[in-house]
Amino acid sequence: MKELVRPARLAPGARVAIVSTSGPVPEERIQAGLDVLRGWDLEPVVAPHALDRHGEFAYLAGADADRAADLQNAWCDPTVDAVLCARGGYGVQRMIELLDWDAMRAAGPKVFVGFSDCTVLHEAFATRLGLATLYGPVAAGIDFIKNARAQDRLRATLFAPETVRTIASGGTPLVPGRARGVTLGGCLALLATELGTPHARPSAAGGLLCLEDVGERTYQLDRYLTQLSRAGWLEGVRGVLLGSWDRCSDYAELRPMFADRLGGLGVPVVEEFGFGHCSGALTIPFGVAAELDADTGTLTLDEPALR
């Protein structure tokens, strides 16, 4: 697995577009996120359909075509330096085929931030654009709005990425050891359901695989990992980072399942790494070469996440 193109870091005055690619977002949450971004001397702009709600499906932020148009137009706007997702939920898989990837590639690299359902976009930006991305807090998320630690970590990555070359999580080794590879991953359920699509990577070979999820039972997470394994997707992975498992089964129940499903890979596995659906979530760059030390719970990037 090769490193991907790193977009340029942000500077004061940069324009950042807020798009709702998945679920609906309350206006007050977007406004609170905008206040945070303005406090960083950024110029946030809200996409035209960011506050839409689908007339038939309450779990979607507007029509598929409108959500896709918002993302593509923001990405292709030369005055926009970064695109931040407003929230996760569900919906990217319904609209991703509507994007013009040739036009987005021609627009050149820029910063993309999102997590959860946005896993699908992280995969697509990697496979279609060859672009490194940031798996971090969403602009209208409660953790981003209310948690200073989550804000500080994202802000440092955006403005001074050389200060966060080593990401220390306080995590513990499920399988000890050190490994080198290129970071990738996201929400486990989305990685499993993306198998076989035009935007998914053929495998995680050569990668440091970051996994997290929300609201899943032990057997469901077992199912996703088993599917990835049966499909050969985990062959050649170099290491695994386990993030948060918010509203999933008790971790005392999850831990032996992870040991059973991942221990046989013969690679280091670190648990409780502190990214995903958790308070004070870390921002993890995807597409960057790094070294994982499961014993110390650290991920050290070869180069800053952004240029």
Image: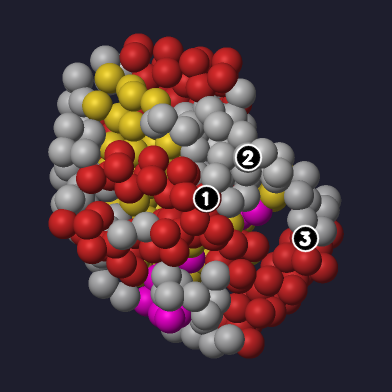
Query: Mark 1 or 2 closer to N-term?
Result: 2
x, y (%) of residue 132?
Answer: 29, 55
Q: How many marks?
A: 3
Q: Secondary structure at mark 2?
A: loop
**Which corner quadrant holds the N terminus?**
bottom left
Q: Secondary structure at mark 3?
A: helix
x, y (%) of residue 213?
Answer: 65, 53
Q: Nearer the viewer, mark 3 or mark 2?
A: 2
Mark 2 is surrounded, within 10 Å at the Cα level, by few (under 14), some (14 to 19) or many (20 or more) other residues, namely some
Residue 110 shown in magenta: no
Q: Which residue is mark 2?
A: 54
Query: Given the image, on which type of amino acid does mark 1 rest?
Result: Asp
- Residue located at (83% from left, 51% from top): 250
Distance CA(mark 1)–CA(mark 3): 35 Å
Q: Which residue is mark 3?
A: 254
Query: Mark 1 or 3 closer to N-term?
Result: 1
- Residue located at (47% from left, 44% from top): 67
Query: Given the image, on which type of amino acid does mark 3 rest?
Result: Leu
Find out whether the residues at labels 1 and 2 contact each other: C-beta distance under 8 Å.
no
**Is residue 109 positioned above or below 145 on the image?**
below
Residue 204 shown in magenta: yes
Mark 3 is surrounded, within 10 Å at the Cα level, by few (under 14), some (14 to 19) or many (20 or more) other residues, namely some
Q: Nearer the viewer, residue 168 or 237?
A: 237
Q: Is residue 294 left or right of residue 108?
A: right
Q: Which residue is mark 1?
A: 64
Q: Is residue 259 left or right of residue 268?
A: right
**Is residue 179 positioned above or below 234 on the image?**
above
Please give the range of residues in magenta: 202-213
x, y (%) of residue 281?
Answer: 53, 37
**Which corner quadrant holds the C terminus?**
top left
Q: Is residue 31 left or right of residue 155?
A: right
Q: Secondary structure at mark 1?
A: helix
